[in-house]
Image (cartoon, rainbow, N blue to C red):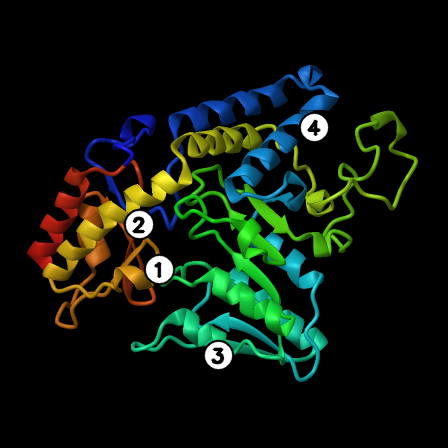
Amino acid sequence: MIPCQRSLFSIPSDVVYLNTAYMSPLMTSVVDAVNYGAKLKATPWDITISDFFENSELARNLFADIVNVSSKNIALVPSASYGLETAAKNLRVGNGRSVVILENQFPSHVYPWQRLVKETGGKLIKVKEKQDRNLTELVLEFIDEKCAIVAVPNVLWTKGLILDLILISQRCKEVGAALVLDLTQSLGAMNTDLGKIDPDFAVIAAYKWMMSPYSTGYLYVNERHWNGEPLEGNWISRQDGKNFSNLINYTDHYEDGAVRFDVGERANFALLPGAIKALKQIEEWGVKNIEATLRKNNSTLAARLCSLGLSVPSECSRGPHFIGAKLPPTFKGDILDVLSRKKIYVSERGGVLRITPHLWNSATDFDRLIDILSKHI
């Protein structure tokens, strides 16, 4: 168990921030690293050729270690939508075939597939929740020989319902379907072994559970797609890109691996140092330890919410870091306004109160949340 890490953040003592699924605060050390990187751009004569490459490779390596794959599988991207559009650009559907997603999935993981079936044929299947059924089982029912792509998260962003990615991946391989994952709402809080899951593509926007600056992220690309087409005609990922004096000798050849899918200007002098600092801290804590700590804290908190009359999915059906609590039908009011007036911050998504603590939260934070809810529900 990891003790409360609030001292690493600049969170005022009267603020109860339970909204990691919206956006994490930055650790003070991450802010310092971002400031250092931004100041480097103020003196460009101090920027060397190695500055365009070293931090990119360090971030790539650190992230690869966390998800148990080679750094050659990792591309640097600015957002989930960038990575998912990259995946869609390198996959096809075709008439009579389908793309399977979840109903109420995050829009960035819907729009590329809507476009793809419109352009290449096929249909989009949205798997609906059923109270008496496991979400993984429902998805598996639609993965058949007509399925071309399964595009799902590990955890549904609205209420935290979880999918078994190992089972889904196994079924995809049986029928020859591609698997594309958006891990933005889980990676960093849940131990995730992409080497075992073996998807075709997996993306994460790092500003939530990876506690990194906004506009940083990572794209896993399976070896099967290393010869694919990137979104951009990037120069820095080409062979001999480090030779600035030779860039006019244009080439169609890229460096090996997923690097061809890197975003342009990946050597972001301000953001990358912050992302690296966050990755190192996550590595120091250990994702398994983070998951165990959040599971224990949330289990206790979920039981207290249920005692107030809120409905919370069972522990086996939701992510260990994620509580989606439905208010009693008798409650009429704006609970977010009530809570924010007391400087308690959560989200509401799809009619569900989304409560997502992290390591900066303490038992006192949970007591304050329960106290206010008990007075207004």
- Residues tagged 1 and 4 counted as in contact (Cβ below 8 A): no
Precedes in sequence: disc 3 or disc 1: 3
Instruction: Identify the amino acid type marked 1.
Output: Gly
Precedes in sequence: disc 2 or disc 4: 4
User: Circle 3 sits in a helix, a strand or a loop, which is it?
Assistant: loop
Residue named by callout 3: 141
User: Circle 1 sits in a helix, a strand or a loop, which is it?
Assistant: loop
Q: Nearer the viewer, mark 4 or mark 3?
A: 3
Residue named by callout 4: 52
Instruction: Identify the amino acid type marked 2.
Output: Thr
Q: Residue at x 56, y 20 (%)?
A: 39
Residue named by callout 2: 356
Residue named by callout 1: 160
Whether residue 203 is situated above or below residue 64 in the rendered picture: below
Residue 359 place in picture, x, y as percent: 30, 37
Instruction: Identify the amino acid type marked 4.
Output: Phe
Residue 127 horizontal side relative to residue 199, left or right: left
Whether residue 75 is situated above or below residue 41 in the rendered picture: below
User: Circle 4 sits in a helix, a strand or a loop, which is it?
Assistant: helix
Dot 3 crowding, Cα within 10 Å, few <14, some 14–19, many 20+: few
- Residues tagged 3 and 1 counted as in contact (Cβ below 8 A): no
